[in-house]
Every structure is written in C-alpha cells, then in structure tokens.
Image (spheres, rainbow, N blue to C red):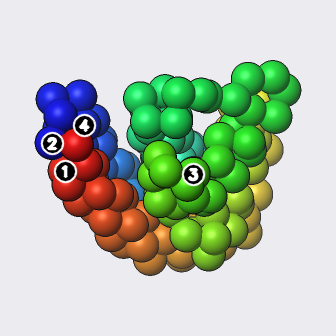
Amino acid sequence: MSKSASLLAARILAELEDIEITVERAVQGWERAKTKNDEYYLDGVALNLHGFYSGLERIFERIGAAVDGSVPSGANWHRELLNQMSIEIPGVRPAVISEGLRENLEGYLGFRHVVRNVYTYHLSPEKLDALVTQVQTVFVKAKSEMAGFCKFLQNSE
C-alpha cells in the first residue's frame, strides 16, 4: 500500500469517529428536546445533522482529490460530488458508496443547505424528526461502506 493511500484511509477512519459523535449528539439532543419540550435543543440537533453530512462530504472531497483526481465545482458541486462517490471508476476505484446510501444521503445534503441558509427558528421539527430517526441507520451503513473502501485503499498499490 502506498503512503498516500494509507494516509487517506487513516483520515477517513478518523473522520468517521468524529462523525459518529455528531450522530450521537443529534440523537441525544432530539431526545432532550422532546422530553424537556425545549425547542432550543433543536438548534443543536440541526447543527449536528449538518455536521454529520459535512463530515461525510469532507471524506468525499478527499477521495475525489486524492483518488479520482477531480472534485466537482460550480453551483451543484455538492450533489455532483455525492453522485461521483456512488459510481465506479473503472481502473481507478470501486464505488465508494452504494446507490441506496446515496439516496439516503440526499435528504441530509438538502438539509445541510437549509441549515446554512435559514434561521434555526424556521426549521421544521417534523423534518428534523425524519432525519434524526434515520441518522443512526444511515451512519452505520456509511461507516460500513467507507470501511470497505478503506480496505480497497489498503490493498491498492
């Protein structure tokens, strides 16, 4: 395994550890918001859901730059990057994530945009509920698929 592939795999795994903490904080914040009937917890939930997707996107950017040799640019680069990670590049790498995971992540991608452009008091608790309810399952799938990609990196020349 090359040093650069080894470094990339290590960075991916470290980022996943940080993402796992944001997932736990989003879920815990949601539970506190419900039990204490305190909408200020929703701000933290939104921030951690944003952190969940942003962390995955940082991984995707690193893979795009280091392995694919290309990170999308332009107005829709976030969506294009997500799509790029779900396709195999023959002779370069397998798909980083499955099509099913890509579909799961689209809602978090859209929410990331909302969090960056809307005041938190305008966020929909129903939308937060849908995302928080799924985030642990989506993360477990992402972590598993990323671990598989790290094995690919570790076995590459």
- State if disc 4 and disc 1 touch (CB < 8 Å): yes
- State if disc 4 and disc 2 touch (CB < 8 Å): yes
How far, Cα to Cα, is label 1 from label 2? Answer: 5 Å
In the picture, measured across the screen, residue 9 lies left or right of residue 93, that is: left
Foreground residue among 8 and 57: 8
How far, Cα to Cα, is label 1 from label 4? Answer: 7 Å
Q: Position of residue 77 (x, y in %)?
A: 74, 32
Q: Position of residue 14 (x, y in %)?
A: 21, 42
> What residue does disc 4 label?
5
Crowd rating for badge 4 (residues with CA inside 10 Å; few <14, some 14–19, many 20+): many
In the picture, measured across the screen, residue 6 lies left or right of residue 37, that is: left
Foreground residue among 109 and 128: 109
In the picture, measured across the screen, residue 35 lies left or right of residue 124, that is: left
- State if disc 2 and disc 1 touch (CB < 8 Å): yes
Q: Position of residue 50 (x, y in %)?
A: 55, 43
Q: Residue at position x 48%, y 70% from top?
A: 138
Tell me the amino acid under the disc marked 4: Ala
> What residue does disc 1 label?
154
Labels 1 and 4: the sequence-earlier one = 4
Tell me the amino acid under the disc marked 1: Gln
**Total marks placed:** 4
Question: Which quarter of the figure is the C terminus placed in?
Answer: top left
> What residue does disc 2 label?
1
Crowd rating for badge 3 (residues with CA inside 10 Å; few <14, some 14–19, many 20+): some
> What residue does disc 3 label?
89
How far, Cα to Cα, is label 3 from label 1? Answer: 18 Å
Q: Position of residue 71 (x, y in %)?
A: 61, 28
Q: Residue at position x 74%, y 44% from top?
A: 79
